[in-house]
Image: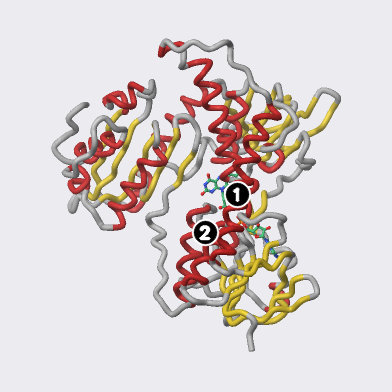
Amino acid sequence: MADYDVIVIGAGPGGYVCAIRCAQLGLKTACVEGRETLGGTCLNIGCIPSKALLHASELYHAAGHDFPKMGLKVEKPSFDWPGVQAYKQSTVDGNTKGIEFLFKKNKIDWLKGWGAITAPGEVKVGDAVHKAKSIIIATGSEPSALKGVEVDEKVIVTSTGALALGAVPKRLAVIGAGVIGLELGSVYARLGSEVTVVEFLDQITPGMDLEVCKALQKSLAKQGLTFILGAAVQGATKGGKGVTVDYRLRKDDSAGSVEADVVLVATGRRPYVAGLGLEAVGVEMTERGQIRTDAHWRTNVSGIYAIGDAIAGPMLAHKAEDEGMAVAETIAGRHGHVNYGVIPGVIYTSPEVASVGETEESLKAAGRAYRVGKFPFMGNARAKSYLMGDGFVKMLADKETDRILGCHIIGPQAGELIAEVCVAMEFGAAAEDVARTCHAHPTCSEAVREAALACGDGAIHA
Ligand SMILES: Cc1cc2nc3c(=O)[nH]c(=O)nc-3n(C[C@H](O)[C@H](O)[C@H](O)COP(=O)(O)OP(=O)(O)OC[C@H]3O[C@@H](n4cnc5c(N)ncnc54)[C@H](O)[C@@H]3O)c2cc1C
């Protein structure tokens, strides 16, 4: 007799969502988590604490820079760093406790400790071995290492250390111009750090729509971030006055260096599967160290599934959550599905960036005929009243059928606005469907409608 129908290993957004859905579908469920609190990387050391710091620093910056433009008077704004950290921690605590409540509500057993799969259908936690009909691996990811750069989480830090620095550094070097590097770089730039971002590629945020990347870089440069692109970091050396990051420019192999008080290594993340015992049970991995799964999140070993950052695909909390729900439905005998063509990506900088679906570059590469509908936030009354007229919405639609293929937004509330486009894409909508939908005035969402109108007879306010 199995103790459980399902044991989920890992309580991040993939694992905890999966456990809740399994329980809701009538499966006896346990979730193993070795961390002191539930919620995984996302709630403890990822999405949530970073967004709390982004929010606090954005308001601080607005108080200093935007309030006077609106006739609002405050004494010169200042901050109390331990207070900011306490606000961040209370946000984290509120959310992780919320998951604990949901586990109790759904009668999910939290098996506290680090789990290992000792055989198909068996998970060992501490000295206890628990049996389950299905095992779902949702063990997430950890920061990738960079040759020549030794992390101590004090002066050479990953995102984990960067979220909990003892003080705001005077000079911060960020290695890697991806989402995490730019978000945390923005936090410290707003709080007064001199931020230099060193990136291997010739552009920031690789994979995003190029026009949006360029607009974002320009805007962040205006906010004081310095970019060194096309630079291969050779190493980081600690000295009396901080850390020296040495790099070589890829175009001519010339050497350069950046001096910093703190160095953030933000060069990506890799799946975390240490101690799970996957080799012994024969679970296959990909060449990139991910757990190999089929279209139903099954590994090659019967009864063992995997989801989230531990498998292929974008390392995003909502992708992990969707897989968690879908695999639960599959195990319960339903038809779980994830549409990987409609997974939005958001960068919570200011301006915010959000995108979904194809980019102009990917459509060109595929030789697909498309139309572009673009609308600047400068033509949107609400955005202008927020002093956020920079940026635009860019919608891409099939030239023949008008079906929406992708959308890229840089500007106010981009992360909220993209949801409308995701729903439209899920329903196979044409740009005209969005264009003919009444949008409330004055809202930033009118800019999305205008971009859809621009795919047809033209936007009104541009
Ligand atoms: C700084 C930062 C900011 C981010 N911001 C965003 C964002 O804004 N939006 C977004 O979508 N994504 C963001 N991400 C990415 C997001 O956090 C991950 O994609 C997401 O957490 C992956 O979920 P997961 O469930 O696969 O794994 P994780 O959240 O990594 O959870 C895995 C859990 O499994 C546990 N575990 C591992 N091995 C075992 C074991 N053997 N036994 C028991 N427990 C185990 C771990 O302790 C961990 O709690 C961010 C990441 C970082 C680092």
Picture disc at residue 455: none
Q: Amino acid at mark 1?
A: Leu
Give the labeled residue for mark 1: 43
Q: In the visual, does 30 lie left or right of 321? A: right
Q: Position of residue 181 (x, y in %)?
A: 60, 37
Q: Is residue 355 above or below residue 54?
A: below
Q: In the visual, does 281 lie left or right of 13? A: right
The one nearer the camera, 100 or 257, is 100
Q: Secondary structure at mark 2?
A: helix
Quarter assignment of residue 426:
bottom left
Q: Position of residue 256 (x, y in %)?
A: 69, 27
Q: Amino acid at mark 2?
A: Ala
Q: Is residue 355 above or below residue 302?
A: above
* Of the two numbered discs 2 and 1 in the rendering, the one whose residue sits closer to the viewer: 1
Picture residue at 34% right of the left edge, 53% below the top: 366
Within 8 Å: ligand 1 and the Cβ of disc 1? yes
Picture residue at 67% right of the left edge, 35% below the top: 86
Tag 1 or tag 2, which sits nearer the N-term? 1
Q: Counting other residues with Cα less than 10 Å from the Cα at mark 2, is it few (<14), some (14-19), or many (20 or more)?
A: many
Q: Quadrant of the C terminus?
A: top left
The one nearer the camera, 367 or 106, is 106
Q: Which quarter holds ligand 1?
A: bottom right
Within 8 Å: ligand 1 and the Cβ of disc 2? yes
Give the labeled residue for mark 2: 320
